[in-house]
Amino acid sequence: MNDVFKFINDSRQAFIKFLDGLTIEQLNHMPEGYNNNIIWHFGHVVVSTKALCYLRTGILKQPSDILFYEFYKSGTRQAYRVRGNEFQKLKSLANRKYQRNKE
């Protein structure tokens, strides 16, 4: 199980490293023919992992308990231009370590 958490954490760190090399304009750019941009995909990774882990297991009862859920859940599209402060908050959420509770 620890390998799964390590994979999640390592993948997020690689994604953040890639994103840190882009400008906010590049993150918000919507390529022609696509429904979402890079920043939406990053937000979706952050939000959907938490939703799968906590909503589906019943640990959290309401989707509103997950920050940014309504903006990045499955089936949504980028509806607004993300600013730097939201990007920083998403990175902070992504940097929270997933770990197995030791009982």
Image: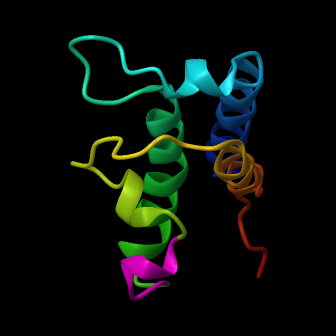
Q: Note whether residue 87 is visible.
A: yes
Which residue appears at 67% of the width and 44% of the height?
A: 87
Q: Residue at x 77, y 49 (%)?
A: 95
**In this view, 30 is above or below 75:** above
Q: Quadrant of residue 102?
A: bottom right
Residue drawn at the location 42% of the way across and 64% of the way down:
69
Choose between 1 and 12: the one closer to the eye: 12
The quadrant of the picture occupied by the C terminus is: bottom right
Q: Is residue 29 magenta?
A: no
The percent position of residue 68, horizontal first and vertical second, equals 49, 63
Q: Is residue 27 left or right of residue 17?
A: left
Q: Position of residue 40 (x, y in %)?
A: 45, 38
- Compared to 75, does 68 lie above or below? below
Q: How many marks?
A: 0
Hey, which residue is sitting farthest top in the picture? 32
Does the magenta portion include 62?
yes
Q: Which of these two is toward me, 62 or 31?
A: 31
Residue 98 place in picture, x, y as percent: 70, 58
Percent position of residue 90, x then y: 65, 50
Classify residue 68 as left or right of residue 102.
Answer: left
Which residue sits at x=69%, y=17%? 22
Residue 31 sits in quarter = top left
- Residue 57 seen in the current view: no
Q: Which residues are magenta?
A: 60-66
Compared to residue 38, the image places residue 2 above or below, namely below
